[in-house]
Image: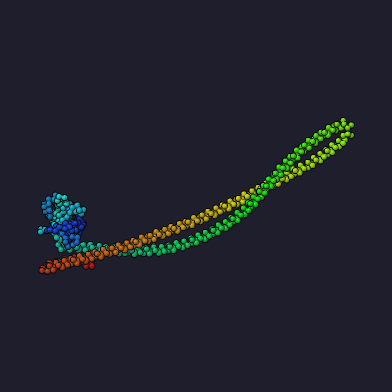
Amino acid sequence: MDSKFIDNHLRRCVKVLFPIVPLRVNIESVGIRKPQMFYMIVEKMDLQNLIQIRMTQLDDHSRMFISTIDNTGYEKIRAEQSLHVSFQGFIDHLIKILDSCKREELHLALVTDNSGHSLQIFEKSSFKNLTHLFLSLESASTETVLFHINQSLQILQEQANAYSSQVQQYQLDMNAKNDAIDKLKGEIMSLNGKIMEQENRIFNWNTEEVNRLNQAIKSLNECKDNEEKRLKAIISSMQENIDRLTKDIYDRTERMVQETKRFEAIREDNLKIRSQNSQLKDEFERLQANVSSQQNRESRSEMTVSELKRQMLEMQSKMKIIEKHRSELEAELEAEKNICHTKKHALQLTTDELANASTVINNLNKENMKLKSKIDLRTEIAMRQEKLLLEKEKQLKELGSTVAAIEQEHMRNRSTNEEHAEIVKRIKETTDIIEEKYRKKINDIIMKMSSNPNVEAASVLSTQGRYIRPQNRVE
């Protein structure tokens, strides 16, 4: 039955129920009890009620114990240990028990005595250990040991080949990443050159623009100062003229008031003289009326009449003078009115000129504000360009950090490749040590079996020829 699990044709029908797992096993023999680690695996022949439990020591793969159970063997175990399940139920419970051992809920013990080896599965308690199952084990034959060692070597060889291909793939990835890094470095250098050229162009353009704006501002300030000086001179002269005209107007107004008062006085005198004239006329009429009655007294009053005539003539001449003086005063008053109107028109023209000057000053202030807004706009554009330069520097820093991350990844891949190379080297060394150890054991077996060279040596040599070939493949 054991040979079925090492037959290359039947091996394809083997199904692994419990994969290979290292478990702690207590070794109990006469006076000796110590824990050791064993690889535990359970395999089943497909479409047959046949299982095999195999234990291999972790440090020495030549120490192997197997237990092959079929229907007959299970019936014997069932009768001895009072089991209540079928063969398939036994397999399921065995897997569950081994899972419990894996979680260290149950424990394993390999008991060696004169009758052979047995595997005990027990549960520890404070009172006593409760045994769940024990199975008889036997040492594996040399052919079985060599078969499984050969399988291990094939697996190691496949892992070594996989590691080698992985290392080659890593090497290709590293070369590709190195090419990408070189390309990125070239792009970074070209970008740095372009950025420096752009910075120089922007700086030169900004410098020229700032110089041009400074010159424009300087010329505008000079124009503004000259215009302010001219306007201040015009305003001061106009203010002087206004003050002088105001003073003249005030003086002329005072003179007009005085002349008006004098004219009123003259008019009152004229009214008085007119009233006197009317009185004189009345008196003259009264006198003419009384002439006829006073002809007798004509001689006496002739002198009085002549005197009165003379006074009347003087009064008439005074009236003419007063009338002439009144007309002169009216002409002077009219001339003063015309002069005041002219001065008022000049004052209006001066006010208009002042308003125009204020409009010019406001326009200059508006133009100055526009120039200031242009300067602020150019300053904002320069700040935006500086911000863009800062963003470009930030992008360059991020690109540098990306390159540094790529280099770190390159270093990690290199260290990983070194670790894989070291693992492959250790695997090869372990394989060489195992092959050397088993080669020595095989040679010892050949020497021990040299007493029967025709049969046993031939079988050993054939076995050696079948299972030592992977060694050559590893080398």
Q: As drawn, is 317 to the left or to the right of 53? A: right
Horizontal relation, residue 214 to residue 150: left or right: right
Q: Nearer the viewer, residue 404 or 304?
A: 304
Question: What residue is shown at x 63% (from left), y 51% (from top)?
Answer: 235
Q: How many marks?
A: 0
Is residue 147 shown above or below 368?
Answer: below
Residue 179: tell me if it is visible.
Answer: yes
Residue 12 location (% of width, % of height):
20, 59
Looking at the image, residue 338 lies above or below residue 474: above
Residue 218 location (% of width, % of height): 56, 58
Q: State left or right for residue 278 relative to residue 82.
A: right
Vertical side of 141 occupied by 98: above or below: above
Residue in view at x 65 percent, y 52 percent? 237
Image position, residue 474 (x, y; %): 23, 66
**Residue shown at 45% from the left, 57% from the top:** 387
* Furthest residue in direction top, as rendered: 293
Q: Nearer the viewer, residue 247 or 201?
A: 247
Coloring applied to the structure: rainbow
Query: For residue 401, which quarter of the picture?
Result: bottom left
Give the quadrant of the N terminus: bottom left
In the depicted view, which residue is nearer to us: 350 or 120?
Answer: 350
The x and y percentages for residue 160 are 25, 64
Residue 90 appearing in the image? no
In which quadrant is the C terminus drawn?
A: bottom left
